[in-house]
């Protein structure tokens, strides 16, 4: 089973870290530098099982991206996980209320990310716990 992830972050270094972790778990990944670029990927027809989303990005921020994805019925099955340095309780509540499924606060460990994916049922089957 191929599991797809779209890694959305304006930091190239952070995209590399998240992508490396996900590919190590067996994901097929693509990357986007901001929310609009990520929406363009979805509109092209490459619909992932998971999007990891930074909050603070130019052009379209993470919350705007979550709202845009949730507004499109074709993308209802996409799991949205915020991966951000925004740690304020109010921000977490806003993201979850908008339709994000999980919230990972930077800095994080690969194990923390894997644990969240396990919680969501999104660990590829080949990976043993």
Image (cartoon, rainbow, N blue to C red):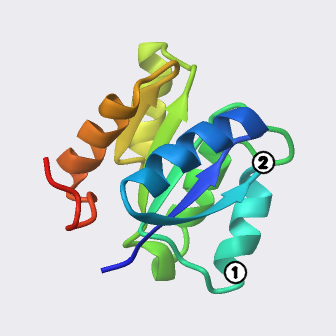
Q: Look at the image and tell me whether residue 11 can be seen.
A: no
For mark 1, what is the residue? Answer: 43
Placement of 55 over or under 91, stated as above or below = below
Can residue 100 be seen in the rendering of this structure? Answer: yes
Q: Nearer the viewer, residue 7 or 92?
A: 7
Q: Nearer the viewer, residue 12 or 121?
A: 12
Q: Which of the numbered marks, if any, corresponds to residue 1?
A: none
Residue extending farthest top: 88
Q: Residue at x 32, y 30 (%)?
A: 112
Image-based side of 113 in relation to 106, left or right: left
Q: Quadrant of residue 2?
A: bottom left
Q: Nearer the viewer, residue 12 or 35?
A: 12
* Residue 60: image tag: 2
Residue lying at the far left of the rendered structure = 129
Where is residue 15? Give x, y as percent. Answer: 66, 43
Q: Residue at x 24, y 38 (%)?
A: 115
Q: x, y percentage for residue 61?
A: 72, 42
- Apparent side of residue 115 relative to residue 9 in the rendered image (left or right): left
Give the residue displayed 86% in from the left and 47% down from the top. Answer: 59
Disc 1 residue crowd, few under 14, some 14–19, many 20+, Cα 10 Å? few
Q: How much space separates mark 2 and mark 1, taking CA atoms?
A: 15 Å
Instruction: Please state the horizontal and vertical placement of residue 35, each as a whole percent of the image.
Output: 72, 53
The quarter of the image holding the N terminus is bottom left
SS at badge 1: helix
Q: Earlier in the sequence, mark 2 or mark 1?
A: 1
- Secondary element under disc 2, as helix, strand or loop, is loop
């Amino acid at each position: 089973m191929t599991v797809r992830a779209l890694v959305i972050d304006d930091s190239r270094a952070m995209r590399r870290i998240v992508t490396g972790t996900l590919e190590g778990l067996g994901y097929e990944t693509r990357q986007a530098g901001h929310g609009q670029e990520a929406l363009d990927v979805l509109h092209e027809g490459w619909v992932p099982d998971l999007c990891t989303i930074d909050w603070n990005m130019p052009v379209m921020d993470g919350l705007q991206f979550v709202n845009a994805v949730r507004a499109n019925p074709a993308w209802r099955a996409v799991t949205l996980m915020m991966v951000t340095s925004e740690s304020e309780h109010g921000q977490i509540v806003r993201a979850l209320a908008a339709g994000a499924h999980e919230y990972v606060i930077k800095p994080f460990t690969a194990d923390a990310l894997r644990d969240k994916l396990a919680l969501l049922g999104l660990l590829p089957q080949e990976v043993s716990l």
